[in-house]
Image (spheres, rainbow, N blue to C red):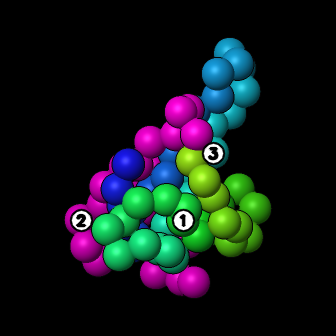
Amino acid sequence: MRAQLGDVLVVESPTTGVTKRDGEIVGLHHEDGTPPYDVYWSDTDRVTLVFPGPDAHIRHVAHGQGMPAGEGGASGTN
């Protein structure tokens, strides 16, 4: 898993009926884009250090566009 600043981390729930979480990656701890990441969560407006598990994936966003349409988040804010 490799990310760039501004990409979206999506965590899918393995349990049916439970909402997934998504957040903007606002901090990288390794130059090659590997975890862990500082993530600004769209549902809590907080930044946490995240070590993504197997239920997570990266949604790459074109540089400067923020989070994709239809997703919550902190596009352009830190």
Among all residues in the image, which is located at the extreme left? 62
- Image point 54% across, 65% down: which residue? 37
Residue 68 position (above or below residue 12) = below
Callout 3 secondary element: strand
Distance from Cα at disc 3 to Cα at disc 1? 15 Å
- Image point 68% across, 15% down: which residue? 16
Q: Which residues are magenta?
A: 53-78
Q: How many marks?
A: 3
Q: Earlier in the sequence, mark 2 or mark 1?
A: 1
- Image point 70% across, 67% down: which residue? 48
Q: Earlier in the sequence, mark 3 or mark 1?
A: 3
Residue at which label 2 appears = 62
| Residue 53 x/y as whole percent | 58, 40
Residue at which label 1 appears = 37
Q: Amino acid at mark 1?
A: Tyr
Membership of 55 in magenta stretch: yes
| Residue 71 x/y as whole percent | 50, 52
Q: Quadrant of residue 7?
A: bottom left
Callout 2 secondary element: loop
| Residue 17 x/y as whole percent | 71, 20
